[in-house]
Image: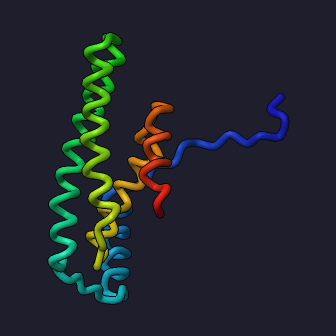
């Protein structure tokens, strides 16, 4: 008894035809899409981009310190994690107070906001965040 289910043979597609249709469709979309002119980052955003690179390096070091602490939790690894978090926080504060004039600068500021939201797993870090934003 099949309970009303129809069993069909598997379908086979010619992938060359399928990919050809996809390429034609994408070319059609590119022709019809409005032209977007991206301008080079301005001077203020260039400074933010440099700070963003420093922030990404500090965040990577912080993650490495967190992994080391997870593998071997002792006073030395906890201190290294605190130092790495403080270094990332210093760079994040500089980026937060800087002004973005274009999309490139806003992307850097968005990464810092991501770090603020998801990058602080310790309760003591929340106290630091509240203290740094009390003036705002």
- Image coordinates of residue 128 in percent, x first then y, are 43, 42
Please, is residue 124 above or below residue 54 in the view? above
Q: Nearer the viewer, residue 13 or 31?
A: 31
Please, is residue 96 above or below residue 71 in the view? below
Say which residue appears at 38% left-offset and 60% top-offset.
Answer: 110
Q: Residue furthest front?
A: 135
- Image coordinates of residue 48 in percent, x first then y, are 22, 65
- Image coordinates of residue 124 in percent, x first then y, are 46, 33
Q: Quadrant of residue 31?
A: bottom left
Q: Nearer the viewer, residue 107 or 8?
A: 107
Left or right: where does residue 49 sit relative to residue 5? left
Tally the numbered discs.
Answer: 0
Say which residue appears at 15% left-offset and 77% top-offset.
Answer: 43
Q: Quadrant of residue 57?
A: top left
Q: Quadrant of residue 77?
A: top left
Q: Nearer the viewer, residue 31 or 97?
A: 97
Say which residue appears at 26% left-offset and 15% top-offset.
Answer: 76
* Rendering colour mode: rainbow
Say which residue appears at 25% left-offset and 51% top-offset.
Answer: 91
Please, is residue 9 above or below residue 78 in the view? below
Please, is residue 106 above or below residue 14 in the view? below
Q: Nearer the viewer, residue 54 or 103?
A: 54
Q: Which quarter shows the N terminus?
A: top right
- Image coordinates of residue 126 in percent, x first then y, are 49, 40
């Amino acid at each position: 008894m099949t309970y009303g289910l129809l069993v069909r043979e598997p379908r086979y597609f010619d992938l060359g035809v399928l990919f050809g249709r996809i390429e034609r469709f994408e070319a059609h979309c590119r022709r019809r899409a409005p032209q977007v002119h991206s301008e080079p980052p301005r001077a203020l955003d260039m400074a933010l981009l440099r700070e963003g690179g420093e922030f990404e390096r500090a965040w990577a070091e912080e993650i490495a310190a967190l992994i080391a602490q997870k593998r071997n939790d002792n006073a030395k690894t906890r201190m290294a994690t605190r130092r790495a978090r403080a270094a990332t926080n210093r760079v994040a504060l500089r980026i937060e107070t800087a002004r973005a004039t274009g999309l490139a600068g806003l992307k850097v500021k968005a990464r810092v906001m991501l770090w603020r939201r998801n990058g602080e797993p310790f309760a003591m870090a929340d106290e630091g965040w509240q203290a740094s934003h009390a003036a705002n």
